[in-house]
Amino acid sequence: MEEQKAKILVVDDNPVNLALLEALLAPRGYQVILSTDGPDALRQVARQSPDLVLLDVMMPRMDGFAVCRELKKDEATRFIPVILVTALDQLTDRIRGIEAGADDFLTKPINEQELTARVRSLLRVKKLNDRLLDAHGHINALADQTARLLKTFNPLEFNLEAGLRELLQQTLLKSEEKRPEAVLLGIRDNDGHFTGWLYSAGGEGQNVKAERLALDLTGFEKAYSHNQDILYANWPESTAGCRELQELFAPLLCRRLGTIRNFVGYYGESLVVMAFNYPQPVGGYEADVFRSLMTYTHFLKVVSDQSREVQEAFLYTIDALARAAEANDEDTGNHILRVGAYARLLARELGCSPSFTKAIEHAARMHDVGKIHIHPDILRKPGPLSPEEWTVMKQHTIYGARILGDSPHLALAREIALHHHEKWDGSGYPGGLRGEDISLGGRIVALADVYDALRNRRSYKPAYSHLEAYSIITRGDGRVMPGHFDPEVLGAFQKIAPAFAETYDKLRD
């Protein structure tokens, strides 16, 4: 990918002047575009996006002052430098040019050295403006991406590679004219090794392609662990250190990219991102854009990591509470794990959302948390409970709901604690709810809890096999009846019953 030539639009109604300026500029490596009048010049600007305009003042139909004013009032063209070329030497004419927005003047007859000096100077200004606008565009893209993300961001499900891929597509890989040819991403895992991806983009930055790579950054770390976090270089005109960096990545990238040229990279403790083969030489602007991208990414990662830590602590706490409630019961701690696993299987088979399916596994573990308020003598009684004891026992559903409270994070667990002994036919407790008046979580855990209770030995009953438990749930035995369960939940259980047996064996006490 060769560096693009600067495009210069020359506007003059005199063909001789056009030929002269083209003869002076083209040999110096500029792409020269010719136009013979003002209206055509505006059309050429719209089509060609020149880097500089050499504009004759005295033209029919639309003079140079008018063309300049049109260019400078349009947001899309206002930063294109305009040199007015004129034989007029009156102060009032120059003032008119300044008021029209001209960036510089050349007086006829044109001096070749003056022309090339002014062109080089204004092209440098244009390049700086372009970089500044490009950086501004990246900042706006980051802001837009942040606004979109805030509407859907779930820190517990944030994936660093997927998030960076989307971010790169919206920023670095979006502009076809200015994007790098490829971006290399390396993420360090918990064992200290890097997993790599190489990204490239199609037209207009769409359809970003990702190739997974075996990535060994040992040499890179040894060479650059002491450097600043942002590195950039332009090859082959580069420092010895950058040539060393090129040698490190040549075996990995040269087969895919050919030669390696303009480069910007970020090196962090857990993340390495490198953009190769920009169409133009890179510098501080590109480095600052990269720094902004990495700051944004690190912010998301920190929020995600901290949220996961809080979530893990939260789940550990509620599991500890659930286990404490089982301490005086005949059930073991594995009972709550199995019920959670059964609930997850049923929710998935019912087509529930991934977030609900994941949440119910943890929420179901707290179904009997209210038993912490029930006296151990009742929980461990070897025979049938008396009517008075049974009345007390039923209260564990209400106690569980009270313990879990009104926190939105525990809403599903609260519903399950309150409803897991309700029955589809209305014969359950504590509220005698019927049908869909019972929460979905309660209907799912009701079956999961009964299955596990049948599989376990109790002081008043033996442990049943999987086939015996399946038969009791689907056909009934007088105590447990199919009408107790939501028909859809029961149907899901019948389809995946072997998975229940596998789960029980895996988590057997």
Image (tube, rainbow, N blue to C red):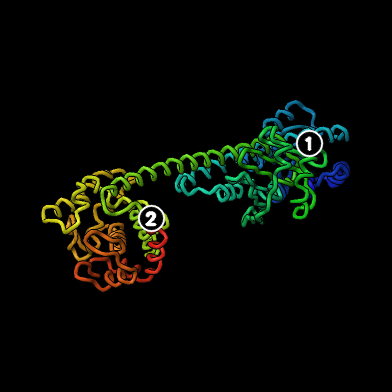
Q: Residue at x 22, y 52 (%)?
A: 380
Q: What residue sits right under mark 2 in the picture? A: 356
Q: What residue sits right under mark 1 in the picture? A: 241
Q: Are marks 1 and 2 in contact (CB under 8 Å)?
A: no
Position in image of residue 381 (x %, y %): 19, 54
Q: Is residue 114 left or right of residue 342?
A: right
User: Does residue 39 show up?
Assistant: no
In what element is the residue under mark 1?
helix
Relative vertical location of residue 439 with respect to residue 373 in this rendering, above or below: below
Between 282 and 418, which is closer to the camera in this rendering? 418
Between 138 and 481, which is closer to the camera in this rendering? 481
* Outermost residue, top side: 91
Mark 1 Cα shell of 10 Å, populated few (<14), some (14-19), many (≥20): few
Between 178 and 183, which is closer to the camera in this rendering? 183
Callout 1 amino acid: Gly
Callout 2 amino acid: Phe
Position in image of residue 83 (x %, y %): 76, 36
Closer to the chain start, of discs 1 and 2, is 1
The image quarter in which residue 343 lies = bottom left
Q: Quadrant of the C terminus?
A: bottom left
The image quarter in which residue 121 lies = top right
In what element is the residue under mark 2?
helix
The label shown at residue 16 is none
Mark 2 Cα shell of 10 Å, populated few (<14), some (14-19), many (≥20): some
Q: Residue at x 41, y 65 (%)?
A: 502
Position in image of residue 230 (x %, y %): 67, 36
